[in-house]
Image (spheres, rainbow, N blue to C red):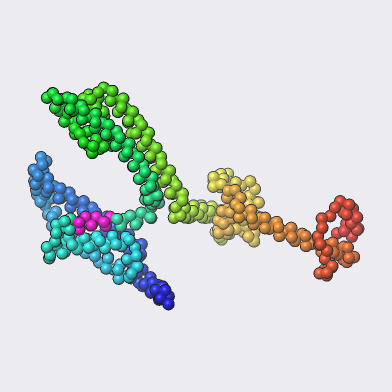
């Protein structure tokens, strides 16, 4: 009883006008556009705060306060925050009112609630009640969660959807790859840290002070050495290689080159190949992507066949007779075009007979017929042919049984035999065929 009432309430909620409004794709797209604009405003706000901080620190190129560089920006940014915050608050209220308890069943809606709550704490409640500064910083960071809503719209773009799907599917590979790479880099880091420390301890002369400090900056601690190894692997490796070669030992040029070739090139190439494989695998096995590709191919096929039909229908009556069909199929360009679509045409007359209905072909018949004839024979088509052949075989056996019953009982060939007179069908040998009565020959 409870499940029936729950399903009834759910149906009532989904049929309400407010629910249809807040779940409409246009409404979602409009909110996403507002989020993009708000993100741009937030970037200007961050730039404004950076200008003010640079002036406060006395940085060389920041000689004016932010208000002088961007006059009126403070008022504009504060007003825009109130505008966007109010829009998102109204949107949240509408979604809760329209969707009811369904709203809280979606994790993305919890993100929306947290962002609106962060705006209330940062903008509204801060001016009324004293709030801990740490909570205010968390509230400001919560506003960045609005960008997460844009991820929901990625499902409308195949390339971005494949990217996010591949990232989700390759989490395990990513973790194991990172673990292997980190352990390998840690081994190299510990080795180079030990070498650098011994070099610094050995070179006590004042003339080596700058070199020792530079060695310490790169390899002085384990964390510095690990960071340096990833820097060598992923980017700026020549300065570190020169430092090891000039201030530690000449032989480290061999180490730097071998490390760059094996780890920086070969290992990373293998990891990239694994990620590419996971991307292709995710694209091939994802149900949504497969359905989209199938639907896209079907729509392209329908569009092409409709264009062909419109070009062939000279009378404009919506039907192709045999003459019109043969004329268009005799065009070499059309034949090559259909061959590129995996439909080889050797005899237009035969193709017309396979597609036609009542001597004419309509646009849906052309689309469906060409779709069935494209490519190699499908298992479904082979099964249909096998079933039809079996039916013909059964009909021939029945006719053969009727003829045998009529002949061997002395009845006319067209007389219907009695059920008890029917004989079982047996294969006819060559000797029996020679003893067939003259009546059989006449038939």
Q: Quadrant of residue 368?
A: bottom right
Q: Tell which residue pokes out farthest to the bottom in this image.
A: 1
Asked if 423 appears above or below 262 in the picture, the reply is: below
Question: Where is residue 128 shown, x and y percent of the image?
Answer: 12, 65
Question: Where is residue 313 shown, x and y percent of the image?
Answer: 56, 56
Task: State the extent of the magenta-drawn residues as a range.
Answer: 138-147
Q: Decide if residue 377 is on the left or right side of residue 164.
A: right
Residue in view at x 71 percent, y 60 percent: 391
Q: Tell which residue pokes out farthest to the top in this image.
A: 250
Residue in view at x 39 percent, y 43 percent: 275
Q: Decide if residue 407 is on the left or right side of residue 130.
A: right
Residue in view at x 17 percent, y 49 percent: 47
Residue in view at x 21 percent, y 60 percent: 118
Q: Quadrant of residue 61?
A: top left
Question: Where is residue 52 shown, x and y percent of the image?
Answer: 11, 48
Of 262 and 352, the residue lying toward us:
262
Of 33 and 209, the residue lying toward us:
209
Asked if 350 appears above or below 17 in the picture, the reply is: above
Q: Is residue 368 visible?
A: yes
Q: Decide if residue 398 is on the left or right side of residue 259.
A: right
Characterize the magenta stretch by its predominant secondary structure. helix
Is 143 one of the magenta-colored residues? yes
Is 435 one of the magenta-colored residues? no
Q: Is residue 327 visible?
A: no
Q: Quadrant of the N terminus?
A: bottom left
Q: Quadrant of residue 202?
A: top left
Question: Where is residue 116 shown, x and y percent of the image?
Answer: 23, 62
Asked if 354 appears above or below 128 in the picture, the reply is: above
């Amino acid at each position: 009883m409870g499940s029936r009432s729950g399903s009834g309430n759910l149906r009532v909620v989904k049929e309400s006008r407010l629910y249809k409004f807040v779940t409409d794709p246009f409404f979602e797209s409009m909110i996403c556009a507002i989020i993009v604009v708000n993100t741009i405003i937030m970037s200007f706000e961050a730039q404004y705060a950076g200008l003010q901080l640079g002036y406060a620190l006395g940085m060389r190129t920041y000689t004016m306060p932010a208000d002088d560089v961007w006059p009126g920006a403070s008022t504009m940014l504060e007003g825009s925050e109130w505008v966007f915050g109010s829009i998102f608050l109204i949107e949240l209220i509408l979604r809760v009112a329209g969707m009811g308890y369904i709203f809280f069943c979606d994790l993305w809606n919890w993100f929306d609630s947290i962002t609106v709550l962060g705006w209330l704490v940062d903008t509204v409640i801060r001016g009324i009640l004293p709030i801990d500064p740490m909570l205010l910083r968390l509230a400001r960071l919560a506003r960045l969660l609005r960008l997460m809503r844009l991820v929901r719209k990625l499902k409308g773009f195949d390339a971005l959807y494949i990217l996010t799907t591949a990232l989700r599917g390759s989490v395990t590979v990513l973790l194991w790859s990172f673990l292997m790479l980190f352990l390998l880099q840690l081994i190299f880091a510990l080795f180079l840290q030990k070498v650098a420390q011994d070099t610094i301890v050995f070179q006590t002369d004042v003339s080596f002070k700058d070199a020792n400090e530079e060695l310490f900056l790169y390899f002085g601690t384990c964390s510095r050495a690990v960071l340096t190894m990833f820097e060598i692997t992923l980017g700026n490796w020549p300065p570190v290689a020169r430092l090891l070669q000039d201030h530690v030992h000449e032989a480290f040029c061999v180490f730097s080159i071998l490390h760059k070739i094996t780890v920086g090139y070969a290992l990373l190439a293998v990891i990239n190949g694994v990620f590419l494989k996971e991307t292709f695998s995710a694209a091939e096995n994802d149900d949504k992507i497969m359905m989209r590709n199938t639907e896209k191919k079907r729509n392209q096929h329908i569009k092409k066949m409709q264009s062909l039909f419109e070009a062939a229908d000279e009378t404009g009556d919506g039907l192709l007779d045999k003459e019109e069909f043969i004329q268009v199929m005799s065009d070499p360009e059309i034949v090559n075009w259909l061959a590129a679509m995996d439909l080889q045409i050797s005899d237009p007359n035969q193709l017309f007979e396979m597609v036609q209905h009542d001597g004419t072909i309509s646009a849906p018949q052309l689309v469906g017929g060409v779709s069935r004839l494209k490519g190699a024979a499908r298992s479904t088509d082979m099964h249909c042919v096998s079933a039809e052949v079996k039916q013909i075989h059964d009909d021939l056996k029945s006719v053969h049984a009727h003829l045998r019953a009529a002949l061997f009982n002395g009845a006319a060939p067209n007389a219907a035999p009695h059920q008890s007179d029917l004989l079982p069908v047996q294969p006819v040998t060559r000797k029996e065929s020679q003893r067939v009565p003259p009546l059989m020959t006449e038939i």
